[in-house]
Image (tube, rainbow, N blue to C red):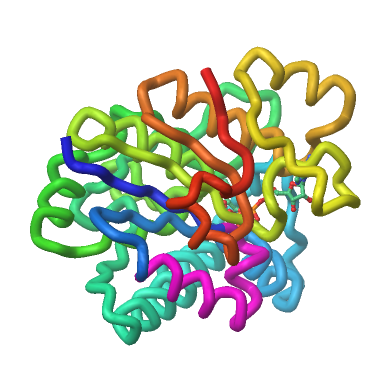
Amino acid sequence: MEKLTIIKIGGNVIDNSENLHRFLEDFTALPGNKILVHGGGKIATELSESLGIEAKMVDGRRITDIETLRIVTMVYAGLINKNMVAQLQAKGSNAIGLSGADGNVIKATKRTGTAIDYGFVGDLNEASVSITTLGALLKAGLVPVLCAITHDGDSQLLNTNADTIASSVAVAMSSLYDTQLVYCFEKKGVLRDINNEDSVVREIKADEFEGLKADGTVAGGMIPKLHNAFEAIKKGVAAVYIGKADELNELSTGNFGTKMLK
Ligand SMILES: Nc1ncnc2c1ncn2[C@@H]1O[C@H](COP(=O)(O)OP(=O)(O)O)[C@@H](O)[C@H]1O
Ligand SMILES: CC(=O)N[C@@H](CCC(=O)OP(=O)(O)O)C(=O)O
């Protein structure tokens, strides 16, 4: 099987042009088949608030009313995705930017049946991902750049957490490629002490996750990120890492961030 690297980059790195530039250089330098998945939650929140629309998050998911859906579509599928593709092209990576609707790459389902009405939020799993389309793009030498916008197949765009997209795409693509999934954010990995950058936990086993939540070691956005990371490793992704965007060049040395174990 050929190798495939799927990288997810979070909003805190995207928001800093110098960090983003460095990350995209390192991403371009990675050998072999690649897919980039990006968020941008921080930028969407800033734009919402500048337009007088309060940003509401519950359990790491944005409550997405129709106004917010318009904003996140413009920010994720437009502003961020197209700028990132242009920068990758300039660095010599033949990137192609896609929402889930493009080529029907990701068909999600509107979240219903929860006590909270999340609005236009899409849920997905590995069956939602078109491995045929993504596989054809990779075979053509292209680098798919996926944003956090999906569709329901019935004209409705949906806002979908980018960590979940990365995990589901990695699981789906594992049937075609020897796939590794790498979550890049602004810290060196999962930290034992959030205030100490040198306290990286090098490996975490799936059965340690509950304990890390219970004792407060992991909190906030790290909880859904780890959940998605363990889903990927349990469902057949060959390797899953969480680490710092500007240390991506350490990936080949095995000295990158936190590694998930089954
Ligand atoms: N133990 C931990 N190690 C590292 N980060 C943690 C930890 N616990 C909580 N976090 C928080 O999780 C955040 C990452 O989640 P999130 O903001 O959703 O990521 P992203 O930028 O990829 O979207 C970090 O910025 C950090 O504040
Ligand atoms: C439904 C939902 O919560 N969608 C996310 C999608 C963006 C995202 O995941 O961005 P980061 O990776 O930068 O956090 C949101 O709108 O914040």
Any magenta on residue 181?
no
Q: Residue at (89%, 23%) from the top-left corner?
A: 215
Q: Residue 184 vs residue 146: left or right?
A: right
Q: Is residue 16 above or below residue 223?
A: below
User: Residue 177, image x and y in percent?
Assistant: 22, 37
Extreme-bottom residue of the structure: 90
User: Residue 77, image x and y in percent?
Assistant: 41, 66
Q: Nearer the viewer, residue 44 or 166?
A: 166
Assign the magenta stretch its main secondary structure.
helix
Any magenta on residue 14?
yes
Extreme-front residue of the structure: 253
Q: Is residue 25 above or below residue 193?
A: below
Q: Is residue 165 above or below residue 210?
A: below
The number of numbered badges drawn on the structure is: 0
The answer to whether residue 31 shows anywhere in this view is yes
Q: Residue at (42%, 58%) from the top-left corner?
A: 147
Q: Residue 144 vs residue 198: left or right?
A: left
User: Residue 232, image x and y in percent?
Assistant: 45, 29
The answer to whether residue 67 shows anywhere in this view is no
Q: Nearer the viewer, residue 32 or 236?
A: 32
Q: Nearer the viewer, residue 227 or 73?
A: 227
The magenta region covers 10-28
Q: Residue at (46%, 25%) from the top-left corner?
A: 233
User: Residue 222, image x and y in percent?
Assistant: 71, 40
Q: Is residue 56 above or below residue 192?
A: below
**Looking at the figure, which quarter contains the N terminus?**
top left
Q: Nearer the viewer, residue 85 or 116?
A: 85
Q: Residue at (84%, 32%) from the top-left corner?
A: 217
